[in-house]
């Protein structure tokens, strides 16, 4: 039986063995306090999950601290074996995990399936990369001395993940931490806790020792974060979310001088130069802007068009946006699902109304799709710096259009933001490609490309978009301390 949004919670659990296991486990533990998880497509109840307190978080930290020495003491090969089992279990249960993800987050189920399997690649990558956490032997001027550098796990990690990628954001943090020999206490978004609980259940089946990977669900993120940032036993915080919250966590972590990985807000420009392949640029812009209803940190937040190709690009871009099917994520024809909740939609609507009031032109309407938490693809022409949407991470399916005349103007417009996560541009000129790629102030650049993430490449930003990298060998280093050993008398 396949899932639909019309099912009752009991029917949903009966149709999805993984969801049934999660609910049975919750009921067996008899939590004193719970909160409801709703489907953003219709606001229907999916399940009630434990609303855990600061005290429960402290208990989880204690368990992680107790488990840390034994986990770190395993060989990289032994940790790799357990991580590979976790990867294989995720792949085996990918259909169930994708259905749970769509239920609680709303994205099309095919897109949810890609997130689950893509997230699993991080586990596979870091399971192998842990075997290559090499140190160094440093030449010395003293014949009787040996100088060594080794890498050791940071320690217990506190991780806080968002709702827009409730599976992929977890594996991207947990995989390198666990591979390096760290234990981890993870707080998922209260909007999407079920995907996290499913991953925790599969981690236990894979053979992770008790306390190594724990999920704390709570409707009070500030209380949980207060424990994670304030407890000296937590040696690193990894957070994905807004710049505002990232700054708060950074300040709270200062007292115990924790290591930080922060993937924060973005205001990504997408530039189309006059020598670009317009059809390829339109396809890239549709994906970069409207994936996950515009609710990604690397979404194209501003589309900058050379004046000479603006008309051709917009005609094709508007047509492609209007052709998108906005519907329930379980609809096989769905291109874009709902926004996460009504507050997110209201925020996006306010940005649209402000832009129109200040002179922007609405190029699409899609009123028949504008209901509940759904919002159709919106394209705004004639956007200026005086509009709030120019300086705000939209996190919704709205594409503001700007124009430019010169390469220098395009780069200046693109860099005119405190954020620096991702940037995209389309050109067929090799010299321009090099110049612009080097001049754009962002941690990740897509040149004639919108799909910029993979387990083998570094993901992260500069400026107020954060610190550290996820994925790649650089992502493993973020969970390792460097220790220098001088050995004399040899």
Image (cartoon, rainbow, N blue to C red):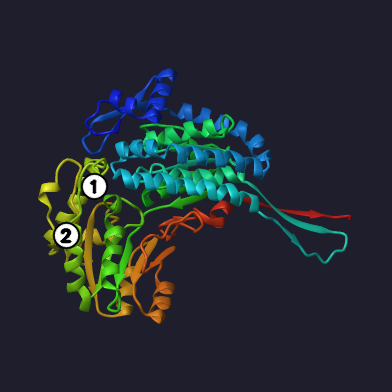
The residue at which mark 2 appears reads as 355
Left or right of residue 298, residue 212 in this image:
right
Q: Can see residue 127? A: yes
Q: Which quadrant of the figure contains the N terminus?
A: top left
Bin the neighbour count of mark 2 within 10 Å (Cα to Cα): few under 14, some 14-19, many 20 and up.
many
Place of residue 245 in the rendered image (x, y in percent of width and height, measured from the top left): 38, 47
Q: Alpha carbon of mark 2 to alpha carbon of mark 1: how far? A: 28 Å
Tell me if residue 11 comes above or below residue 368 in the rendering. above
Residue at 59 percent of width and 45 percent of height: 179
Q: Can see residue 35? A: no
Place of residue 264 in the rendered image (x, y in percent of width and height, measured from the top left): 40, 53
Q: How many marks?
A: 2
Residue at 36 percent of width and 49 percent of height: 242
Place of residue 181 in the rendered image (x, y in percent of width and height, measured from the top left): 62, 42
Left or right of residue 205, residue 370 in this image:
left
Nearest to viewer (mark 2 / mark 1)? 1
Tell me if residue 357 comes above or below residue 177 in the rendering. below
Quarter of the view holding residue 164? top left
The residue at which mark 1 appears reads as 334
Residue at 34 percent of width and 64 percent of height: 417
Place of residue 237 in the rendered image (x, y in percent of width and height, measured from the top left): 50, 45
User: Which one is nearer the viewer's eye here, 209 or 461?
Assistant: 209
Question: Of marks 2 and 1, which one's residue comes earlier in the chain?
Answer: 1
Quarter of the view holding residue 267? bottom left
Bin the neighbour count of mark 1 within 10 Å (Cα to Cα): few under 14, some 14-19, many 20 and up.
some
Quarter of the view holding residue 306? bottom left
């Amino acid at each position: 039986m396949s899932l639909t949004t019309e099912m009752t919670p009991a029917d949903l659990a009966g149709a999805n063995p993984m969801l049934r296991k999660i609910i049975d486990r919750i009921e067996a533990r008899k939590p004193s306090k719970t909160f409801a998880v709703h489907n953003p497509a219709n606001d229907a109840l999916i399940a009630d999950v434990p609303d855990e307190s600061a005290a429960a978080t402290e208990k989880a930290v204690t368990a992680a601290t107790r488990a840390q020495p034994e986990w770190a003491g395993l060989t990289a090969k032994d940790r790799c074996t357990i991580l590979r089992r976790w990867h294989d279990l995720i792949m085996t249960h990918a259909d169930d995990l994708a259905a749970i993800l769509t239920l609680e987050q709303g994205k099309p189920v095919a897109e949810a399936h890609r997130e689950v399997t893509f997230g699993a690649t991080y586990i596979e990558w870091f399971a192998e990369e842990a075997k290559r956490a090499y140190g160094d032997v440093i030449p010395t001027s003293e014949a009787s001395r040996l100088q060594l550098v080794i890498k050791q796990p940071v320690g217990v990690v506190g991780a806080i993940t968002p709702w827009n990628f409730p599976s992929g954001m977890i594996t991207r943090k947990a995989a390198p931490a666990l591979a390096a020999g760290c234990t981890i206490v993870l707080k998922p978004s209260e909007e999407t806790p079920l995907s996290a609980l499913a991953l925790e259940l599969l981690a236990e089946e894979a053979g992770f020792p008790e306390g190594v990977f724990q999920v704390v669900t709570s409707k009070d993120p500030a209380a949980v974060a207060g424990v994670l940032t304030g407890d000296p036993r937590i040696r690193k915080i990894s957070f994905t979310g807004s710049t505002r919250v990232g700054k708060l966590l950074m300040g709270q972590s200062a007292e115990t001088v924790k290591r930080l990985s922060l993937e924060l807000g973005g205001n990504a420009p997408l530039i189309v130069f006059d020598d670009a392949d317009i059809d390829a640029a339109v396809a890239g812009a549709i994906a970069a802007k409207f994936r996950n209803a515009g609710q990604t940190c690397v979404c194209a937040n501003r589309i900058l068009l050379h004046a000479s190709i603006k008309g051709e690009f917009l005609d094709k871009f508007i047509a492609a946006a209007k052709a998108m099917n906005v519907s329930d994520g379980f609809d096989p024809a769905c291109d874009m699902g709902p926004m996460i909740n009504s507050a997110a939609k209201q925020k996006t609507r306010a940005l649209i109304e402000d832009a129109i009031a200040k002179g922007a032109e609405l190029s699409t309407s899609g009123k028949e799709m504008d209901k509940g938490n759904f919002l159709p693809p919106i394209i705004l022409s004639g956007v200026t710096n005086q509009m709030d949407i120019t300086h705000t991470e939209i996190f919704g399916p709205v594409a503001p259009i700007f124009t430019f005349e010169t390469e220098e103007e395009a780069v200046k417009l693109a860099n005119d933001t405190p954020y620096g996560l991702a940037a995209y541009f389309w050109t067929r000129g090799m010299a321009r490609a090099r110049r612009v790629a080097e001049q754009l102030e962002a941690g990740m650049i897509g040149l004639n490309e919108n799909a910029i993430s993979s387990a083998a490449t570094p993901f992260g930003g500069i400026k107020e978009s954060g610190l550290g990298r996820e994925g790649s060998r650089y992502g493993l280093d973020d969970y390792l301390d460097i220790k220098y050993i001088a050995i004399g008398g040899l």
